[in-house]
Amino acid sequence: MSDRMFPQEIDSETIFAVWRIDGQTQQLLENARAATVRALDEFDARAARLDKGEATVAAVLANPAERVNVLTALKQHWRDLFCQGPSSAGLQRSAQIGRRHFEVGVKPRHYLALCQLLSKIMTDALIGETKIDATFAVDAVGRVVMMDAEVVLGSYYGSLADLVSYEAQSETRSLKDRLSVLEDMAFLDPVTGLFNRRYFDRSIAVEIARASRERAPLSLLICDIDRFKEVNDTWGHAAGDKVLNDLAGVLADMGRKTDIVTRFGGEEFCLLLPNTKPEWGKLVAERVRARVEGVLIKLDNGEVLKVTVSIGIGSYRAGDTPAQLAQRADEALYRAKGQGRNCISD
């Protein structure tokens, strides 16, 4: 394995806040304890029945003895996590569990696949319960599973975005296969392949906490495609999807490794820029605006489109919440629209 094993600090309070592991979530998990225990008891059997290529028990490790040890430790860890309730100490144990797993050869994509399987098994068990609010319990369990994966994988790679980058460099599987697990776990936008609103909400909370702790600058750009409705109305939604996809590629190519590019929703994209002062945020915004203006988008019918974007810039201020920073960027976007579009505002 790489020698960069777990270089990241685990900020338990931030992780809890991001995944909303609050008193209500703890109570939901307590109410769902019986179903949770049954689901974990069924884990081995369910994993063994999966089709070839999925997260089968055999796929986890080539060495049968190590495989038994890993799965035993993993199931015990999950039992503690769900039945005793998530805790700061539990998050620290998650990192140690991950350390042991990766040291004996568990691949990160297998760990994510096992977490995905766990979510499916838990969901099936909870849906059949009549004594609990299954909808809220499923959401609570999903948050805890992803929080655990965030700790285990994030401690190793620094972030799930780095995980995707690492996998892209180290695996020979197709991009679609490499990203399928993350997509299934609701972090990716299916049209553009960018991270989605859910990932943005998680990331902005983490980056604001980091900016506050390190007294570092942070900039947020919200980009809105000008007159996007006219594209859909004139050339159809397939053309609209092509515009979204091509623009996503431009934005992703322009970002630094540390930047977080997401599709916020509809025709809006967000660029979260850590360690970026306001003046640099304006330079990046202008660079993005000019680059998009020069892109030619070729439709399947041979038509060529050009689109522009308006960009609002928000800069982190001490004490900001994620909502406050996003609101300032959004207000700046409206000013850019009011100035005639295809421009930036802060």
Image (cartoon, rainbow, N blue to C red):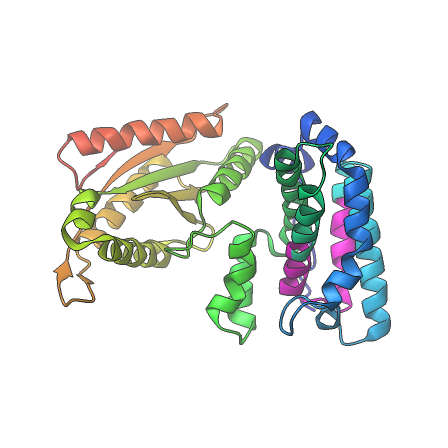
Q: Position of residue 82 (x, y in %)?
A: 77, 41
Q: Is residue 64 left or right of residue 208?
A: right
Query: Which residue is at the far top?
Result: 319
Nearest the eye: 265 or 254: 265
Magenta stretch, main secondary structure class: helix
Does 77 sit above or below residue 298? above
Q: Position of residue 70 (x, y in %)?
A: 81, 62
Res. 143 image quadrant:
top right
Q: Position of residue 280 (x, y in %)?
A: 33, 41
Q: Identify the image quadrant of the N terminus.
A: bottom right
Identify the residue shown where x is 78% and y is 68%. Answer: 104
Q: Which span is picked out in magenta?
A: 92-116
Does 220 sit above or below residue 287? above
Does 338 sit above or below residue 1? above
Identify the residue shown where x is 52% and y is 49%. Answer: 186
Identify the residue shown where x is 53% and y is 74%. Answer: 173
Q: Identify the image quadrant of the C terminus.
A: top left
Does 234 sit above or below residue 322? below
